[in-house]
Amino acid sequence: MPIPAIGAMMKIWPNEFEAHGTHVGIVPLCPAHAPDLEAVIAKSNLHKLLFVAIPEPTKIMQEIKRRNRLRVEGSMQPFAVIDKRTDRVVGMTTYMNIDATTPRLEIGSTWYCPSAQKTGLNTECKLLLLRNAFENLNCRAVEFRTHVMNHKSRHAIERLGAKFDGILRSHMVLPNGAIRDTAVYSIIAAEWPNVEKNLTWQLEKPRP
């Protein structure tokens, strides 16, 4: 099924969105991003990571089409993540589990290449996505979910200021057949001002 042009999707909530900061650019995911994504996956064998579902380099176009199909259906809004140091695409992220009625959503299906980690890119990416969610989309809550055993991811979510909601046991079947327990975190609208201040401080403080 062909993916409609961006203009044809404007009525789907959330509206089309992109943002640019000092470290990161967030833009709607499209097939033109495939070469950069294929290269960063192949270079670091990201598709072999245990707790993160990253496609093999040869399947990245298929993944881009899948995420955009979910965009058309209204359940996901996918983005390419650009490293401002190189202006190259270094990963993906999404708004997902979108509930326009409440409204609320999850920030997830996120991955970056190793060279972009510990650079301020993830912190600024989350800051821009959260700011849009709370200030433009008027979300009541934003969720984060990860494998219960992915302690690196859980620490990163907690560092954002998200609160632990609980564990969804036997929540998902992974591609290798394993059963995943999912740790769920969230930030609610009342917490956003303090979360924003904390993330801004993290970006401004000197890095080791």
Image: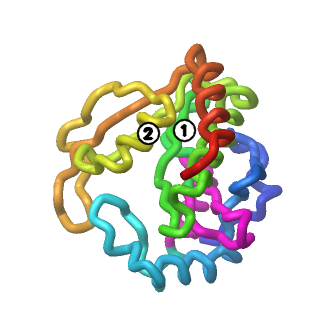
Return the disc, 2 or 1, that comes first in the chain's sequence.
Answer: 1
From the viewer's side, name the closer residue of 149 and 178.
Answer: 149
Q: Secondary structure at mark 1?
A: strand
Residue 82 is a magenta residue: yes
Q: Residue at x 48, y 77 (%)?
A: 41
Q: Is residue 98 left or right of residue 83?
A: left
CA distance for labels 2 and 1: 19 Å
What residue is shown with label 1?
A: 98
Q: Which quadrant would the N terminus be assigned to in this image?
A: bottom right
What residue is shown with label 2?
A: 157
Q: How would you rate the neighbour count of disc 2 (Cα within 10 Å): few for under 14, some for 14-19, many for 20 or more?
A: many
> Percent position (x, y) of residue 117?
51, 60
> Percent position (x, y) of residue 195?
58, 26
Q: Quadrant of residue 200?
A: top right
Q: Secondary structure at mark 2?
A: helix
Q: Quadrant of residue 61?
A: bottom right
Identified by mark 2, the residue type is Ile
Q: Is residue 90 above or below residue 196?
A: below
Q: Quadrant of residue 3?
A: bottom right
> Percent position (x, y) of residue 141?
53, 25
Q: Residue at x 47, y 83 (%)?
A: 43
From the viewer's side, name the closer residue of 15 and 195.
Answer: 195
Q: Is residue 93 above or below residue 74?
A: below
> Percent position (x, y) of residue 197?
65, 26
Residue 159 is a magenta residue: no
Q: Residue at x 23, y 48 (%)?
A: 149
Camera-side mark, 2 or 1: 2
From the viewer's side, name the closer residue of 31 and 202.
Answer: 202
Identified by mark 1, the residue type is Ile
Q: Is residue 194 above or below residue 38?
A: above
Stretch of the chain drawn in magenta = 63-92
